Image: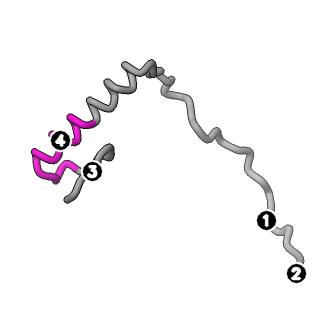
C-alpha cells in the first residue's frame, strides 16, 4: 500500500502490525500538531446527537388514486 504525504492509510485489526504502528504514530503526531497550533478537544456528552430525532410525518394515504 502506498501512503501519501499528510494522509493516513486505512487499516484494520487485520492489517500488519507495522502498518498499524505507523498509522498510530501519524495520528499521534497530527493530534500533537493540532493541539500545539492552538486547537482544543472538547468532551461531548453521551446523549448529544448530531441529528436529533424528527417528528414523524404522516403521509400514508395522501397520494391520489
Q: Residue at x 26, y 30 (%)?
A: 28
Q: Which residue is mark 1?
A: 60
Where is residue 2 shown, x and y percent of the image?
22, 57
- Label located before the other in sequence (1 or 3): 3
Q: Is residue 25 magenta?
A: yes
Q: CA distance from mark 1 to mark 3?
A: 46 Å
Mark 3 sits on what residue? 9
Kindly identify which numbered label has been placed on residue 17: none
Mark seen at residue 22: 4
Q: Position of residue 14 (x, y in %)?
A: 16, 53
Tell which circle, 3 or 2, labels the residue nearer the N-terminal end. Answer: 3
- The answer to whether marks 3 and 4 mark residues whose Cβ atoms lie closer than 8 Å is yes
Dot 3, how many residues are within 10 Å of its Cα: few (below 14), some (14-19), or many (20+)? some
57 to the left or right of 49 = right
Callout 3 secondary element: loop
Q: Position of residue 12 (x, y in %)?
A: 23, 50
SS of the residue under disc 4: helix
Residue at (50% x, 23% y) in the render: 45
* Disc marking residue 65: 2
Amino acid at each position: 500500500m502506498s501512503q501519501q504525504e499528510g494522509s493516513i492509510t486505512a487499516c484494520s485489526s487485520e492489517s500488519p502490525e507495522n502498518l498499524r504502528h505507523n498509522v498510530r504514530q501519524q495520528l499521534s503526531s497530527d493530534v500533537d500538531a493540532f493541539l500545539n497550533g492552538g486547537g482544543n478537544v472538547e468532551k461531548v456528552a453521551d446523549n448529544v446527537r448530531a441529528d436529533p430525532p424528527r417528528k414523524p410525518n404522516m403521509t400514508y394515504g395522501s397520494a391520489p388514486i
